[in-house]
Every structure is written in C-alpha cells, then in structure tokens.
Image: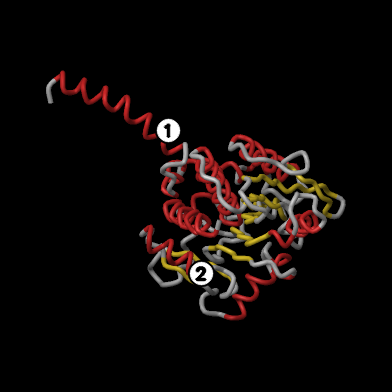
Amino acid sequence: MTKIAKIIVFCVLAVVLPFMAGAQRSGYVISPKNGEVAVSEQYVREVVDHLCAESLGGRATGSRGAAAAAAWIDDQFDNAGLEYRGGAYLQGFKVGGSLARNVIGVIPGKTSKVVIVMAHFDNLGNLGGSFFPGADSNASGVAALLQLVKMFAYMKECHKTYDASLVFVALDGKEKDQAGAADLWARIRDGRLGFSPSDISLVVNLDQLGSTMSPITKGNPDYLIMLSEEATGRRSMLSNAEKSQHIGLELGYDYYGSKDFTKLFYRNISDQRVFLENGIPSVMFTSGITMLNNKPGDTPDTLDYPVLIKRIRLIFYYLDKVL
C-alpha cells in the first residue's frame, strides 16, 4: 500500500469508526457481545488476590478484614456507576455482638421486575492460628460478581436497558447461618430497597466458582453446575446460551447425580435458601466442593482462571436472556 493510500484509509477510519461507535451507543446496534469488551482475566485475578490477602485476615463475619473487604467492594460498585438504595451501598446488620455489612448496587431496568445476583465475601478468618484465605470459597464468586458488574455497566454505557433491574449483592454472614441473605430478604420484604418480593423474577447465587478439581466428567475441566428447580431455573436459556456462544462448558443440573447432595447444597447450606423458603425462583452456580474448601490450602493459585472466565461469560449470556 502506498503512503497516499494509507493516508486515505486512515482518514476514512477516523470518520467511520466514531460514527459506528456512536451508532452502537445510541441504540442502533446493541448486542450482548459488547459486554465481552469488559472481560478481564487480570481483573478477576486481582479481585481474588485482594480478598485473599493476609491483611484481610480471612474475612470472618464481623471482623475488621470483612469490613475492609466490604468497603473495597463498595468502591468497585461506585467505580462501575451502580445506583444504591437506602442512602448507601453498604447495608449494616448485627450478627451476635458484631456489625456485618452487605454491599448492594443496582442497574435500573424498564419495569418493576428485578433479578438479584449475589455472592458472599465472608469466610472463616483465622482459626486455631491458621489463616483461611477462602479463594474458591468465595473470593471466586465475588470475582465473578464484580466482573459481571463491569460487563453490564458497559452494556448500560452502550445504551442497553433491560426490562428487569439488576440488583448486585455482595453478602456478609454466610458462615453465620446465612445471616447476610436473611438481612437482605428482610429489607426486601419490608420494602426498604424499593421493590417487593413479588417483583423478583430470579435470584442467582454464585458460590465456589473457580475450581476445576471436581469435574462432572473425569478429565474434563471445562464445566459448570447450575442447581435449580427444573420448572423455574430457565435451564434451556443456559443451554441455548452455551450452544449459541460456543463457550465449551459441560453443563450439569444436579450435584454429581446425588439427590441428597443436590438438596443439601441447593436448599440448605447456601445463600439462596431464604429465597427458596419464601417461594422465590432461585439458581446456584458452582464448580463444586473440593478437598481444599474451608482449609488453609484454599489459595488463589489453586483456581483455574481461564475456565472461571468461561463460566462468567456463560452466566453473563444467561442473564442477558433472563433479563
């Protein structure tokens, strides 16, 4: 290409590309593919590393480390331009004699409908002189939550408005009988967050999402488990998103074929429990329990970040369909 030709091409691009970007942002071409722009494996790693730092002490509910983690997540919500309810992102509640905090941010939709996406950030802290970093449980879920925040915030920048509002919640108190989820439910029930239980279309819980140590099929690390009621979990939307985007994840809809363990993890020991007890459709995304969970060895270097990114991308496309 001659020098003159290069100059002509540069000038044409200088005119056309801003026009194309403007068209995309003004609503002419808005595809969920736009959300991929915000995907960053480096950011996901940084979230996990930050939450697992010894300076946060393992993020035990009500501890200084948990308070510092909540404040940092608050900053992430603020940087993404999320709206808050009740005057602040941070929503405090008591657990025993300690103050715990949920972090709640909103991307408004066009209707009164609401989809809640949540992940707990607390962990075991320090026990018996041992530090529990809680990388998979559940820094991985929070990293997925914050990456989804960035993706949907970018969709908003592109002038995409969904029917339902997205309510992102980083929960404290999971290790204290799911106290954070219970407080969240109480605020919704009492109308303190600006919507009612009947407005909730779906609750999506992200809990232990970063490991590939417990695959559905032996030897295949590319998988994702979604626990839900068959009638309300919108499983076809997940499988259709996987097929259309060719992400390459094997999907499972129970806990390794066990009815008892599926019931245990879906209905009893994770944060969607209170919503299920009150008749709210809920799903849980997980990569399963490993031998490192709730142990000092649950460290950032044990996670499979490329697969975690695949899971986040699929959950994003699933939510795009749900909304």
Asked if residue 310 is positioned above or below residue 259 in the image, the reply reads above
Q: Nearer the viewer, residue 30 or 218?
A: 30
Q: How far across and how far down the image is residue 257, in percent?
A: 52, 79
Disc nearer the start of the sequence (1/2): 1
Crowd class of label 1 (few under 14; some 14 to 19; many from 20; radius 10 Å): some
The residue sitting at 46% across, 37% down in the picture is: 25
Q: Nearer the viewer, residue 17 or 145?
A: 17
* Rendered image quadrant of residue 68: top right
Q: Amino acid at mark 2?
A: Arg
Q: How far across and how far down the image is residue 96, in percent?
A: 86, 55
Residue at the disc numbered 2 = 235
Front disc: 1 or 2 = 1
At mark 2, the secondary structure is helix
Q: Is residue 29 left or right of residue 234?
A: left
Tell me the number on the disc at residue 82.
none
The residue sitting at 54% across, 48% down in the picture is: 148
At mark 1, the secondary structure is helix
Q: Quadrant of the N terminus?
A: top left
Asked if residue 260 is positioned above or below residue 143 in the image, the reply reads below
Q: Which residue is at the far right?
A: 97
* Rendered image quadrant of residue 200: bottom right
Q: Amino acid at mark 1?
A: Gly
The residue sitting at 54% across, 59% down in the picture is: 322
The residue sitting at 50% across, 53% down in the picture is: 316
Crowd class of label 2 (few under 14; some 14 to 19; many from 20; radius 10 Å): many
Q: Is any part of residue 98 visible from this angle?
A: yes
Q: How far across and how far down the image is residue 174, in percent?
A: 71, 58
Residue at the disc numbered 1 = 22
Q: Quadrant of the C terminus?
A: bottom right
Colour basis = secondary structure
